[in-house]
Image (cartoon, rainbow, N blue to C red):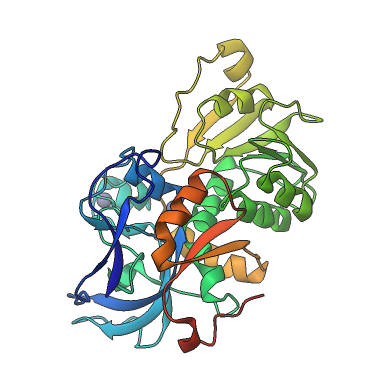
Amino acid sequence: MKAQVLKKITSLDENPEPLELVDLPVPKPKQKEILIKVSTCGVCRTELDEIEGRVQPKLPIILGHEVVGRVKKLGPGATKFKEGDRVGIAWINSACEECYQCRRGNENLCKQFQGTGCHANGGYAEYTVVKEDFAYLIPERFSDLEAAPLLCAGAIGYRALKLTGMEDGETLALYGFGASNHLVFQVARYLYRNSKIFVFTRVRGDVHSKLAEKMGADWVGETGDKPPEKYNRAIDTTPVGGVIRAALENLEDGGRLIINNIRKETLIPELDYTKHLWYEKEVKSVTNITRKDVQEFLPLAAEIPITPEITEFKLEEANKALISLKQGKYRGAGVLSIADSSQYQSINYR
Ligand SMILES: [Zn+2]
Ligand SMILES: [Zn+2]
């Protein structure tokens, strides 16, 4: 099978082709695993962190944790799906299922948490295997391309939104408007109909701010701008440390900022306690994802229904997709198209 493999940690600025397209044997599903013929796989900022070493992957590794495909073969003892079912895999590849955190439903915090495309091979390939308990049926209303970004950008965005503690009528600020926040926007609009949503992007007039305007944000500006009023809840998806201070400056007393990012590429500047934190302002990070998040989010996404903004790349173009993501060149979510689309009628281009 064709696969894009990361063999060593490198800097994308110095090495624009970190992944190598190679031919590998199709993996065999072990006990309670399923073999999936991959159709699409989303491109996530976490891949940039893995390539550049801010997150340490097992090497060599096939990246990709927003995997959509069809069950090709059941491993011994696998009973949940049947051959041909359309399933997805998310960032959570496994957890110990026994520790204190796992027993409390916080499997995202398990010390033995394994990430798809990081500790176990992911979806930048024609086939992949996964434990059946860590795969999800994909709602019919989404094409293979549309479904991919729901599995991380969407589902973890949903987790971030839940963690804000948002209530209807409160104002929400979104810092960054890429793959995740443009989906969070649609969920928040649906769940909190009387709330205003403000969007901050890197530069006024960039592709992301234009998308936010098109989608009907109540106000769009760039990080550091003063919004028309303070907001109660905020979600930061940017790689920039300084955004945290900027976001706290405009946060209403008793408000909460959620940081939805595995690593910041730049340091968080010093905070002034009185200005940024006093009056019970809260800061909380999002770490990984639970199966429950994905299981709740997929049907909600279909009910809304969410329309992901997709930029499609071929598997062979994975390096180009990653560089474009790093440079903020495309809007919405990048998705690798892997299977020959003529095989699957459910790939509809809207
Ligand atoms: Zn991701
Ligand atoms: Zn555990």
Height in image: 44 above or below 220?
below
Q: Quadrant of the C terminus?
A: bottom right
Foreground of the two, 170 or 136: 136
Residue 97 in sight from this viewpoint: no
Question: Where is residue 193 drawn, in percent x and y?
Answer: 77, 53
Residue that appears at 50% across and 63% down = 335
Residue at 39% of width from left, 47% of height from top?
Answer: 16
Rendered image quadrant of residue 231? top right
Q: Quadrant of residue 78?
A: bottom left
Q: Is residue 272 above or below residue 133?
A: above
At 56% from the left and 51% from the top, the residue drawn is 180
Whether residue 329 is visible, yes or no, is yes
Choose between 69 and 165: the one closer to the eye: 69
In the displayed structure image, the side of residue 221 where residue 98 appears, left or right: left
Instruction: Specify whether 56 is left or right of 155.
Output: left
Residue drawn at (60%, 55%), measured in percent from left and top?
332
Image quarter in which the N terminus is found: bottom left
Image location of residue 174, percent across then percent down: 65, 41
In screen coordinates, is 154 left or right of 131?
A: right
